Amino acid sequence: MRTLDSLPSELRQQIVLNSISYEFQEVIPTSPVLPADEEPPSPIPRIRVHTPLSGVCKILQADTQEVLRRWPDAKTGSFGPLETPWDLRCLNLLSRYFTQRATTLNRAWPGIQEMEIHLFDHRKTSWDYPKGQSIGYDLAAALQHECILREWSGDFEGWIPASIKVLKIDLTIPSGPLKVLDECGQGGAHVLEHERVEFQGKFWYHLFDQVVRTLSNIIWDNGFLNFPNKMEHIAPALENLVIETIGTAPDSQVYAMANTRELWRGKWEKKQEILSAYSSTDSKIVLDLSNYTRQIKAKRVELGLDTMENV
């Protein structure tokens, strides 16, 4: 059996390249003693790039040095999934690090091209809600807030790098809220017998509306810089960003979504513009949910609610 150091150099270096990884460490900036009423400084990310093959032997050490002279390469361009704004801040640092390396090495590098974001909070696998609770706006609002990670909707440090061409968003519903949502269907634990069941369709309408707002916050609103007489976005090239969705509507919700009233269905049947709160111009960025809801279109045809021409 051949050992790693006996392989051809091209193959060894490809193995080294595939073994490279990076991690981010939280570093608390040093500062003088703070007053009792002043908050300590926020941690900042520091990048550490490494490979377990470095230092194994002189041959692999030389291979590692050679690979790092050519790294990042064109394949170093897709990252994710990002689960929190902290991850996005780390991605900013990584993008700057790669760009600086490419400049130092006098090499062309296109930048990070793709990234994936998890919008929903999957830390909670269950959610308690009073059984028999009448379905209303309070339950709809509560369920929405349980789905989307709240940190994405607020102010945070970090923005999408200008080199990004494709943003993939994972729309897999967390198991806790989905269980409650399923129980809001006909005969479910949260439905009183005399009530007309339309809650599930209403939930999806409001959820996708909140998804659009959250994407606007992530893509646009956290990237604006204040100048004396105007505001400018740090990455205006993002106007050509393409959004792709990951996942499909839950099987348990397809029937309810297919039977939802037309007004609510429009939220996922029509492309939604991702607008900025700081600009009145139209946006070229759109959220197209047709792939995510393809089962719903098929169900409407199956139920005779639509024809193939309409879907």
Image: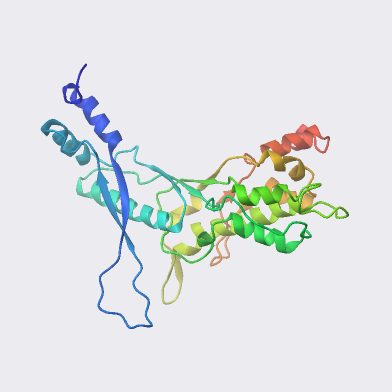
- Residue lying furthest top in this view? 1
Identified at 76% across, 51% down, the residue is 189
Instruction: Give the quadrant of residue 129.
Output: bottom right
- Rendered position, 71 above or below 156: above
Residue at 26 percent of width and 30 percent of height:
14
From the viewer's perspective, is 174 left or right of 114? right
Lateral position of residue 233 relative to residue 309, left or right: left
Relative to the observer, which residue lies in front, 193 or 29?
Answer: 193
Name the quadrant of the N terminus.
top left
- Return the residue found at the far left: 58
Front in this rendered view, residue 284 or 290 = 290
Please report the residue visible at 30 percent of the width from the left and 66 percent of the height from the top: 28
Q: Which corner quadrant of the image does residue 8 belong to?
A: top left
Residue 96 lies, in percent from the top left, at 31, 54
Rendering coords of residue 11 (x, y %)? 24, 25
Q: Is residue 288 placed above or below 282 in the rendered structure?
A: above
Residue farthest right in this picture: 194
Residue 154 placed where, x, y %?
51, 65
Q: Position of residue 261 (x, y in %)?
A: 80, 50
Numbered circles on residues, count:
0
Figure colour scheme: rainbow
Q: Quadrant of the C terminus?
A: top right
| Residue drawn 80% across the image and 52% down it | 198
